[in-house]
Image (spheres, rainbow, N blue to C red):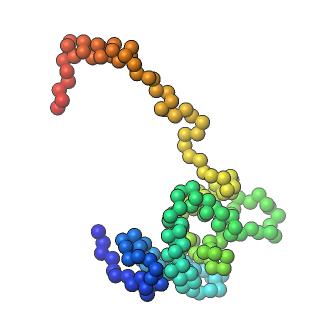
Amino acid sequence: MTLRPFYDLVQLGLDEYEDNELVLNIVHDLNQFFEQQNCTCRHSKKQKDLRTCYEKVGFKRFFERYIELKSLDKKELELVIKAQLMVFEITNEKSDNTNSNIQRYRYCYNSSLPLCKPAFLKLCGINDYLLGTLQNHLHTEGLSERIHGNIGRIPMTDNRVFLNFEITFPLKQFLVQYSCIHGLPSPL
């Protein structure tokens, strides 16, 4: 267990939140993320605004959106992310090729505050692989729900046999006879 430093929630603008373990863990996690210089906004040559994502959005607003997204279940979160990707997709109207496989996205907190990709991933609580998977699914299937696994197959519970006395009695007789002839196995 790592010791985390003391955080003044009033100073961070989180005075309406209770000083409990969940809130403090999230505050610590977000503070560590922003202190590690993960924000790539300043490294972009095309970037006009030289502020980091943390400076643009502010800790309180980032924290509140992070909590909101963390409280969603998996299907809801994927739908929210896909909707944001669809809204902030960068399309090239000048290009003649409308069936291009290359999709580009702007990652945003809202319509006026752009985020870098690492900050967007942190805000949504997902990794780069899941974001790529959601982008591919959005490109191929649209906003439909991702469906996994055992589609169209009969579940194993529907194939089970009902055990009655006609089945269990001969089985018991066999086990008793087998144990008389060969003996019972050692429990060790």
Return the residue nearer the eye: 62 or 48: 62
Quarter of the figure with residue 23:
bottom left
Q: Is residue 8 left or right of residue 159?
A: left
Is 178 located above or below residue 71 in the figure?
above
Q: From the image, which quarter does the C terminus lie in? A: top left
When the figure is inspected, residue 186 is found, relative to residue 28, above or below; the finding is: above
Quarter of the figure that contains the N terminus: bottom left
Position of residue 138 measured from the top left corner of the image (x, y, whole percent): 66, 57
Q: Is residue 129 visible?
A: no
- For image coordinates 69% across by 67% down, the residue present is 87
User: Which one is nearer the viewer's eye here, 60 or 39?
Assistant: 60
What residue is drawn where x is 57% and y is 34%? 153
State the residue in front, 153 or 92.
Answer: 153
**Residue visible at 65% across and 72% down in the picture:** 106
Residue 147 in sight: yes
Q: How many marks?
A: 0
Q: What x and y, as percent, mark residue 96?
A: 82, 64
Left or right of 92: which side holds 137? left
Whether residue 55 is situated above or below residue 172 in the rendered picture: below
**Quarter-of-image position of residue 92:** bottom right
The residue depicted at 57 percent of the width and 86 percent of the height is 51
x then y, percent, for residue 165: 37, 16
Residue 66 is situated, as x and y percent measured from the top left of the image, at 51, 71
